[in-house]
Image (cartoon, helix red, strand yellow):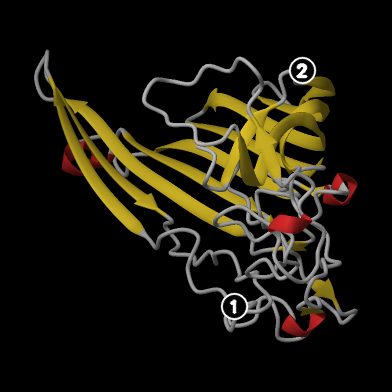
């Protein structure tokens, strides 16, 4: 130690505890002897949440980053004892990036929902839910699989990081089970068509937000390996127009541009939304007795039964040839799985 430039992550030893405030309100009404309707609201506010803060980044500008950092060197505190076998050439050493994990972020969530529940009666049951929600935070989601950098663009003004978080604005889900009626009450046809159960799960939701960014540290302010925190500029043209929302052109590429060298971009965090998703899964099964102590079950499952193509996330880097295109699917195509089980 003492000769090589180091970078490291650190925790704030005096960080306040993280906590989330939650509140909710709901009303229920019976729509008959088997069916219930519930309308509700759910809100939450997260405080002192952890964020990644690069406190030693330089201001945007030309030239080497190192001399422009707030801290160019660090020193061991007097009396620090290091593990045996570590050679210390100098107690003061050059430093580059410092990723301080501090508890200074917030989150906000508001959602209205409607649930319809039908208990099993007369051969079928159903559960349906629709949620309209909005989720915000003022820190990149570095602990979730969002389509953005895990670090802020401008570490000197963290307030500019406020924007949509893992924001699924609309979501609908329905599950149902139906006992199929036998074609005949008796005989061979009745024997092979009775006791079949059909279940279905349908899900549909709007797309995840993404951040239109620049590939590389064009601001020349410092970053972490694999992160691209600099955002694009908004040109004022429509983001969605005729011919968009396709795999070849999900949004209008002319709506964004690469910011000038050594500057930050004007686009906000997670301000463009990607494709939505919908899937229908079906299962058909029958279980019957072979002997007094032996039962046999057959099951056929159809995942993405309609073979619907759910587009993946568009390329979000404005300075790449693939910008705005979608090159992969978010979910696989139709899959059929057959199964049998003998219980004794």
Front residue of 16/135: it is: 16
In the displayed structure, 97 sits above or below 88; it is below
Residue 223 at what x, y percent from top left? 66, 55
The outermost residue toward the left is: 291
Horizontally, residue 167 falls left or right of residue 147, namely right
Q: Cα distance, mark 2 to mark 1?
A: 45 Å
Helix, strand or loop for disc 1: loop
The 10 Å Cα crowd at callout 2, few under 14, some 14 to 19, many 20 or more, is few
Disc 2: which residue: 14
Q: Are marks 2 and 1 in contact (CB under 8 Å)?
A: no
Residue 88 at x, y percent in the picture:
49, 32
Q: In the rendered image, which residue does mark 1 sit on?
A: 325
Query: Residue 155 at x, y = what percent?
Result: 80, 49
Q: Are there few (<14), some (14-19), or many (20+) residues within 10 Å of tag 1? A: many
Query: Which quadrant, please, contains the C terminus?
Result: top left
Q: Quadrant of residue 306?
A: bottom left
Of tags 2 and 1, the one toward the viewer is 2
Which residue is at 88% across, 51% downward?
Answer: 160
Left or right of 23: which side holds 9?
A: left
- Which secondary structure, mark 2? loop
- Name the image quarter holding residue 232: bottom right
Residue under the point 63% across and 45% down: 94
Q: Quarter of the image holding residue 339?
A: top left
Q: Nearer the viewer, residue 227 or 61?
A: 61
Q: Is residue 216 left or right of residue 261?
A: left
Q: Position of residue 273 (x, y in %)?
A: 72, 62
Q: Is residue 66 above or below residue 184?
A: below
């Amino acid at each position: 130690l003492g000769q090589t430039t180091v970078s490291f992550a650190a925790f704030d030893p005096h960080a306040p505890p993280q906590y989330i405030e939650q509140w909710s309100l709901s009303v229920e009404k019976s729509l008959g002897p088997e069916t219930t309707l519930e309308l509700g609201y759910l809100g939450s506010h997260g405080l002192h949440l952890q964020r990644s803060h690069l406190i030693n980044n330089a201001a945007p500008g030309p030239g080497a980053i190192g001399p422009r950092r707030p801290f160019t060197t660090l020193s061991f505190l007097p009396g620090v004892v290091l593990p045996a076998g570590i050679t210390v050439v100098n107690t003061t050493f050059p430093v580059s990036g410092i990723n301080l994990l501090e508890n200074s972020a917030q989150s906000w969530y508001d959602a209205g929902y409607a649930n319809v529940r039908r208990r099993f009666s007369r051969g079928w049951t159903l559960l349906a839910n629709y949620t309209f929600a909005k989720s915000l935070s003022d820190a990149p989601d570095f602990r979730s699989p969002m389509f953005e950098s895990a670090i802020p663009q401008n570490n000197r003004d963290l307030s500019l990081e406020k924007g949509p978080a893992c924001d699924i604005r609309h979501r609908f889900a329905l599950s149902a089970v139906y006992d199929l009626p036998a074609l005949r009450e008796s005989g061979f046809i009745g024997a092979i068509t009775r006791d079949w159960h059909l279940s279905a799960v349908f899900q549909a939701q709007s797309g995840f937000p993404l951040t239109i960014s620049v590939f590389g540290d064009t601001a020349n302010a410092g970053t972490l390996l694999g992160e691209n925190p600099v955002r694009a500029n908004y040109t004022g043209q429509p983001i969605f127009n005729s011919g968009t929302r396709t795999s070849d052109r999900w949004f209008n590429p002319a709506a964004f541009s690469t910011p000038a060298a050594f500057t930050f971009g004007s686009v906000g965090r997670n301000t463009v939304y990607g494709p939505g998703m919908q899937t229908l899964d079906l299962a058909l099964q029958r279980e019957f007795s072979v002997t007094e102590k032996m039962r046999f079950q057959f099951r056929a499952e159809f995942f993405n039964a309609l073979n619907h193509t759910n587009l993946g996330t568009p390329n979000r880097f404005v300075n790449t040839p693939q910008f705005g295109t979608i090159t992969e699917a978010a979910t696989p195509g139709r899959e059929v799985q057959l199964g049998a089980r003998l219980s004794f």
